[in-house]
Image (cartoon, rainbow, N blue to C red):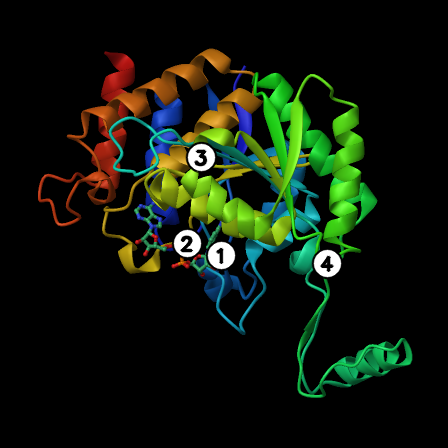
């Protein structure tokens, strides 16, 4: 039976990446019934809404989606579609495997780290009070009554971290480690400074770890983690992090495995799952058939795993890895020199993966 999946092409380079990924997913032989829905800046310009109701309704119905990147205007405009999506569908776990494939130029070839990022809380919860507004003044007054002084000209963002939110993300990290035969989970935090948020994250993580004695557990302060992860990547396995650190460390690890073009991911919730690359819409490359579709394709591999299509997932990942290892029909970012005239386009990379799968 065909799997019904919501396909959101996104904007910028999203549509070309989504098209390449869709072709490879279909070439695995797994049958899909795509429900194509819009989100992002193009949807905003057409309808005034970057995240149309139909898109959300489709995801609620199919419970599974694959999404190209969407642009978020800086400072003003509209709120991030990704943040809204995660909130509306309670996609609380963002899972980003970062493995250095053979053939990719990297100083960290032994990297094989999985990032499990909390997706709904922390400074990303969207609880913000703009400088100069009455709400900001009211909050500062309340804080003053509690003995905390905040400058009048300050903007304020609130960082909530709960027992509930932490418990389920750390459980998700252990569940991932157990299902994939991983040995260790490291909780990442800044509990020495933010005792009541990151401190809570750490203490809940320790409690959850006690329920999983077969998996090793340790913790690291985020700045130290950044240092150690690039000096001794082989010591790290599964990392579980609050939202903001998870966002930053994801890009760090993506850089370690050869760049954003090859870092895929999954957003998993209790009622739905949405698969998407770590990178953004790379708008300067829009419509140029240049960018690397590997990140979205690997997100497609995780989609197949989620749908129970393990065999197809393995074949697709092996084919992607083989094309990268050969290094001929790869996009500019995977060539030793970014101006290499032998680099292929997004769609030709997809052709090479399909050819490899059928070989
Ligand atoms: P970006 O990830 O879009 O691009 C940064 C740079 O990384 C690019 O200029 C390019 O050099 C490289 N790059 C990214 N993807 C690549 C690929 N597939 N192949 C080759 N090179 C690639 O980051 P940005 O420029 O900071 O963000 C652009 C927009 O995307 C912003 O509006 C941002 O908010 C949004 N964004 C969306 C998502 C998402 O939809 N999940 C994630 C991150 C950023």
Instruction: Check mark 1 vs ligand 1: CB closer than 8 Å? yes or no.
Output: yes
Residue ID at (54%, 31%): 5
Disc nearer the start of the sequence (2/3)? 2
Tell me whether circle 2 and circle 1 mark residues in contact (CB < 8 Å): yes
Please give the residue where the numbered disc 3 appears in the rendered image.
233
- Look at the picture and state if 7 lies above or below 284: above
Q: Can you name the residue that lies furthest to the left here?
A: 341
Disc nearer the start of the sequence (3/1)? 1
Classify 10 Å Cα crowding around label 1: few (below 14), some (14-19), many (20 and above).
many
Count how many numbered circles sit on residues in the image.
Answer: 4
Disc nearer the start of the sequence (2/4)? 2
Tell me whether circle 3 and circle 4 mark residues in contact (CB < 8 Å): no
Q: Position of residue 65 (x, y in %)?
A: 55, 36
How far apart, in angstroms, are the residues tagged by discs 1 and 4? Answer: 34 Å
How far apart, in angstroms, are the residues tagged by discs 2 and 1? Answer: 6 Å
Tell me whether circle 1 and circle 4 mark residues in contact (CB < 8 Å): no
Disc nearer the start of the sequence (2/1)? 2
Q: Nearer the viewer, mark 2 or mark 3?
A: 3
Disc nearer the start of the sequence (1/4)? 1
How far apart, in angstroms, are the residues tagged by discs 2 and 3? Answer: 34 Å
Please give the residue where the numbered disc 4 appears in the rendered image.
194
Can see residue 29? no
Give the quarter of the image for residue 154: bottom right
Please give the residue where the numbered disc 2 appears in the rendered image.
11
Tell me whether circle 2 and circle 3 mark residues in contact (CB < 8 Å): no
Q: Nearer the viewer, residue 301 or 175?
A: 175
Q: Nearer the viewer, residue 186 or 138?
A: 186
As drawn, is 66 to the left or to the right of 143? left
- Look at the picture and state if 262 lies above or below 125: above
Tell me whether circle 2 and circle 4 mark residues in contact (CB < 8 Å): no
Residue ID at (37%, 33%): 21
């Amino acid at each position: 039976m065909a799997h019904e999946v919501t396909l959101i092409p996104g904007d910028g380079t999203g549509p070309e990446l989504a098209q390449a990924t869709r072709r490879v997913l279909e070439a695995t032989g797994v049958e899909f019934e795509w429900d194509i829905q819009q989100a992002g800046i193009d949807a905003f310009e057409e309808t005034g809404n970057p995240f149309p109701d139909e898109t959300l309704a489709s995801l609620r119905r199919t419970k599974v989606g694959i999404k190209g990147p969407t642009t978020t205007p800086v400072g003003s405009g509209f709120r991030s579609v990704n943040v809204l999506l995660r909130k509306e569908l309670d996609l609380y776990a963002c899972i980003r495997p970062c493995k250095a494939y053979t053939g990719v130029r990297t100083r960290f070839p032994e990297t094989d780290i999985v990032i499990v990022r909390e997706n709904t809380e922390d400074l990303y919860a969207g609880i913000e009070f703009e400088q100069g507004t009455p709400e900001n003044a009211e909050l500062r007054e309340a804080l003053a009554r509690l003995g905390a002084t905040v400058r009048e000209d300050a903007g304020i963002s609130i960082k909530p971290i709960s027992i509930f939110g932490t418990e389920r993300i750390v459980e998700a990290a252990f569940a991932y480690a157990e299902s994939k035969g991983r040995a260790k989970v490291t909780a990442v935090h800044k509990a020495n400074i933010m005792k009541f948020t990151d401190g809570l994250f750490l203490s809940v993580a320790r409690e959850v770890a006690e329920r999983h004695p077969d998996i090793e557990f340790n913790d690291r302060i985020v700045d130290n983690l950044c240092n150690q992860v690039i000096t001794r990547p082989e010591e790290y396995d599964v990392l579980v992090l609050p939202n903001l650190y998870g966002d930053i460390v994801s890009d760090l690890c993506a850089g370690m495995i050869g760049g954003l073009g090859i870092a895929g991911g999954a957003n998993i919730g209790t009622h739905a799952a949405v698969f998407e690359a770590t990178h953004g819409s790379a708008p300067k490359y829009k419509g140029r058939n240049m960018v690397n579709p590997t990140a979205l394709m690997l997100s497609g591999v995780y989609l197949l795993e989620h749908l129970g299509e393990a065999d197809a997932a393995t074949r697709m990942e092996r084919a992607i890895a083989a094309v990268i290892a050969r290094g001929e029909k790869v996009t500019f970012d995977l060539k030793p020199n970014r101006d290499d005239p032998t680099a292929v386009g997004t769609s030709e990379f997809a052709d090479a993966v399909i050819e490899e799968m059928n070989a």
